[in-house]
Amino acid sequence: MHSLLEAATTGDVRALGKALSVIEDGTPELTELLTGLPDSSSALLIGVTGPPGVGKSTTTGALISEYRKQGLRVAVLAVDPSSPVTGGALLGDRIRMQEHALDEGVFIRSMSSRGQLGGLSSATQAAAKVLDAVGFDVIIVETVGVGQSEVDVVNAVDTVVLVLAPGAGDGVQAAKAGILEIADVFVVNKADRDGSEGVVRELRSMIGLGSQSQTWTPEIVTTVATTGQGLSDLVVAIAKHHDWAVASGDRALRSIERAKLNLRRAVLDSINEHLDANAPTLNSLSSRVASGELSTELAVRQILQDLS
């Protein structure tokens, strides 16, 4: 695993792909790989999220172009819905980023969500850590189309970019109960369409209602991602939030939350592995619970005692 990371650091794309496959597949080498990672958090970590159909992938592709103009190396983790047959990613996002396929300064990896709630694959954070360690300057995490309760992206990145668009249903209404509150930068994409000004007005009104309790006031950027219009303004808005996050300590706090989330997931994975390895015990407890001989609470307590 150490030699694999060294090769990835020198620009070996195949080695990097193998390292990410170890993470995504959860192979036995995973612990060795993550233990050998240098402690680095220098990359700009951006999350691009929003309802389906608003142009997240096109916006991500346009962002890649803007950062490449600055000479920065860019990696993208595009979390796709899972195939119901193979469990793998459907690769829809890569189709929209073909213009960067031959650019050695760009690395794009589609990852299957594998049923993971929150719009992210459970391996996303570890993959981002690897990409940071091997020297990418910007890491963009693009989520699957999210709904009201799928807000895990805030715990995986430093800056959350929420993309909305006119004519895609009531996009603001769809976001109100969840992702609206975690956005650091709002993007009203497809701004050349009728209704974009109305989306901007509604966002400004909602931001105004919550601004008194916020230390950072989210910025609103209008874009036409297909032509690149407004993308330079988006890059500036992301940089402003990043500078504020570093100065205010928000970036450090999010880093702690990421570690906490990873720890929770690792604990849950270990518990599931224990249950799989002790299937007879689990089956016995399940039968006793089903028959009413044992309560669920007491069964859980017994499992935890076995773990300890």
Image (cartoon, rainbow, N blue to C red):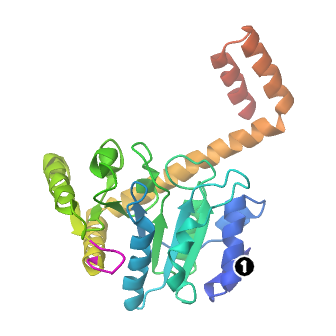
Q: Position of residue 130 (x, y in %)?
A: 59, 71
Residue 59 seen in render: yes
- Residue at coordinates 41% horizontally, 64% vertically from top-left? 48
Residue denoted by label 1 = 4
Q: Quadrant of the C terminus?
A: top right
Q: Is residue 19 rendered to the left or right of residue 176?
A: right
Extent of the magenta region: 223-230
* Image vertical order of residue 275 relative to residue 161, above or below: above
Q: Name, please, the residue furthest toward the right.
A: 280
Task: Between residue 197 and residue 126, name the one nearer to us.
Answer: 197
Q: Is residue 221 rendered to the left or right of residue 61?
A: left
Q: Position of residue 49 (x, y in %)?
A: 41, 59
* Image vertical order of residue 88 relative to residue 279, above or below: below
In magenta stretch: residue 269 = no
**Element at label 1:** helix
Q: Quadrant of the N terminus?
A: bottom right
- Residue at coordinates 71% horizontally, 80% vertically from top-left? 15
Secondary structure of the magenta portion, mostly?
loop
Figure quadrant of residue 28: bottom right
- Residue at coordinates 43% horizontally, 80% vertically from top-left? 64
Task: Between residue 206 and residue 308, name the one nearer to us.
Answer: 206
Figure quadrant of residue 56: bottom left
Q: Amino acid at mark 1?
A: Leu
* Image vertical order of residue 274 relative to residue 197, above or below: above
The tally of labels here is 1
Q: Position of residue 273 (x, y in %)?
A: 75, 43
- Label 1 CA crowd tier, 10 Å (few <14, some 14–19, many 20+): some
Residue 39 seen in render: no
Task: Between residue 182 and residue 262, name the one nearer to us.
Answer: 182
- Residue at coordinates 55% horizontally, 73% vertically from top-left? 95
In magenta stretch: residue 228 = yes
